[in-house]
Amino acid sequence: MPITRKTSTAIVKAADVLGIERLRVAGLLKNRRLAKALSDASLSGFLTMLRYKAEAHGVEIIEAPLNFPSSKTCSACGNKKTKLSLSERTYHCEACGVVIDRDLNAAHNLRNLAASLTER
């Protein structure tokens, strides 16, 4: 599914604050399976759209630190895994037993980060 202007507008209109993370795209492009999809996605163009629309709508964007472990941290209890391979698409927490899609877990962690930083 191509990323569109409508998508960025819908995201901004549905939020008071957005939590995002900057990815090391150069490293991800080394993976042949991801390279085409990432190149097609035009993530930088989408981020540009998101930023100017957020500013126009008064929505704050919180950017996670570069090494923020959004995928390795359990969104339910905060336990951090030391290793999580890219092939593991489901996050299994050894501490609390939660089982969740890896990307959804990361999204929850970014939401929690944005919420905690805006509460201050």
Image (cartoon, rainbow, N blue to C red):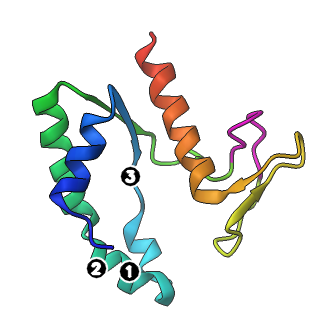
> The residue tagged with tag 2: helix, strand or loop?
helix
The answer to whether residue 12 is magenta is no
> The residue tagged with tag 3: helix, strand or loop?
loop
Q: CA distance from mark 3 to mark 2?
A: 17 Å
Q: Which residue is mark 1?
A: 37
Question: From what the image shows, is residue 46 above or below residue 88?
Answer: above
Q: Which residue is mark 2?
A: 40
Give coordinates of residue 31: x percent, y percent.
50, 84
Amino acid type indicated by mark 3: Arg
The residue closer to the viewer here, 72 or 91, is: 91
**Circle count:** 3
Question: From what the image shows, is residue 114 above or below residue 104?
Answer: above
Contact check, label 1 and label 2, Cβ < 8 Å: yes
* Residues shaded magenta: 73-81
Which mark is nearer the camera, 3 or 2?
Answer: 2
Question: Quadrant of the rendered structure where residue 46 is?
Answer: bottom left
Amino acid type indicated by mark 2: Asp
The residue closer to the viewer here, 76 or 78, is: 76
Q: Which residue is mark 3?
A: 22
Q: Residue at (17%, 52%) from the top-left corner?
A: 48
Q: For the residue carrying disc 1, how many other residues have a C-alpha within 10 Å: few (<14), some (14-19), or many (20+)?
A: few
Q: For the residue carrying disc 3, how many other residues have a C-alpha within 10 Å: few (<14), some (14-19), or many (20+)?
A: some
The answer to whether residue 74 is magenta is yes
Q: CA distance from mark 1 to mark 2?
A: 5 Å
The residue closer to the viewer here, 28 or 39, is: 39
Where does the C terminus fall, quadrant-wise? top left
Contact check, label 1 and label 3, Cβ < 8 Å: no
Question: Quadrant of the rendered structure where residue 85 is?
Answer: bottom right
